[in-house]
Image (spheres, rainbow, N blue to C red):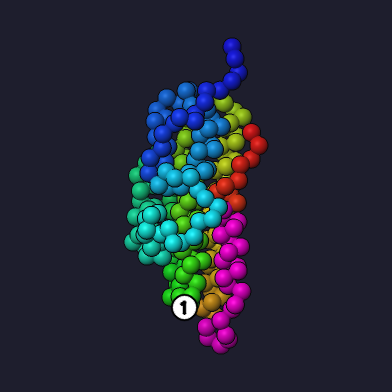
Amino acid sequence: MSGAAPDLSAASWDSTGIHGLAVASRATPTGLVRRWRHYSRDGQPLGRGFRPDEVSALGGDLLNADVFNHQMELLARRMPAKHQKTWRQTQLWARESQDFAGRIYDRDPLLQVELLEAMHTVIDLAQQVADGLAVIDQIETPTYQKLAQQRLAASQTRLQATHAQLQQLQDQIALASLDSPSDNSLPQRLQTLIAANRHILEDTPPI
């Protein structure tokens, strides 16, 4: 028997993630992991040069809590019941991150571009978690199970770190507004956060 796995290149995707994978044994686990990582929530490939002028194409103003929460609800609708606890924590990190970003924007609207871009990476990280939870039970090969678990853990860890960093920035800008000039390093710090998120979103580990 050949050890070669079937090709998944023709698998179709829709706006909620993986589509047409009802028969897990016919799908390549590597393909599942690669595809959940490299596609954004609208089914289009993630690009390295994304800027928030694409907001209208990707779901609206994510600094608006209603818009952001709608995107999260779309991801939650397909979450397997057994993974609800993990997903609730993911939702908490994502939604609180959006709240921190909104507070930062209220105090410094000049950071809108960086904050919008950061929120798009938060949604994409949440989708990686959602897609990972949706497919992980379909993967039976131990090697690929381990790979899928590693990718899922990386997305969760990065989302948690983003939450902590945005909370710190929100606290810092709130304190600075009381008695000191605005911090000129904030745009660069947000870009560093975005770059770290994109590294997880676009990184392809060896199989």
Q: Quadrant of residue 65?
A: bottom left
Residue at 53% over, 74% down = 171
Residue 82 lies, with reference to residue 196, above or below; the image says above
Q: Which residues are magenta?
A: 176-198
Position of residue 118 measured from the top left corner of the image (x, y, whole percent) = 50, 61
Report crowding for label 1: few under 14, some 14 to 19, many 20 or more residues within 10 A (C-alpha): some
In this view, which residue lies farthest toward the top? 1
Position of residue 109 measured from the top left corner of the image (x, y, whole percent) = 45, 75
Residue at 44% over, 62% down = 53
Left or right: 74 as drawn, with respect to 105: left
Q: Amino acid at mark 1?
A: Arg
Foreground pick, 172 / 60: 60
Foreground pick, 9 / 132: 9
Position of residue 35 measured from the top left corner of the image (x, y, whole percent) = 50, 38
Residue at 60% over, 36% down = 147
Dominant secondary-structure state across the stretch colored magenta: helix
Residue at 40% over, 54% down = 58
Q: Which residue is mark 1?
A: 107
Position of residue 176 measured from the top left corner of the image (x, y, whole percent) = 56, 81
Check the picture and name the quadrant holding the N terminus: top right
Q: Note whether residue 129 is visible.
A: no
Check the picture and name the quadrant holding the C terminus: top right
Q: Secondary structure at mark 1?
A: helix
In this view, which residue lies farthest toward the right? 206
Residue 50 highlighted magenta (yes or no):
no
Foreground pick, 35 / 56: 56
Residue 105 lies, with reference to residue 195, above or below; the image says below
Residue 186 highlighted magenta (yes or no):
yes
Foreground pick, 185 / 173: 185
Q: Note whether residue 123 is visible.
A: yes
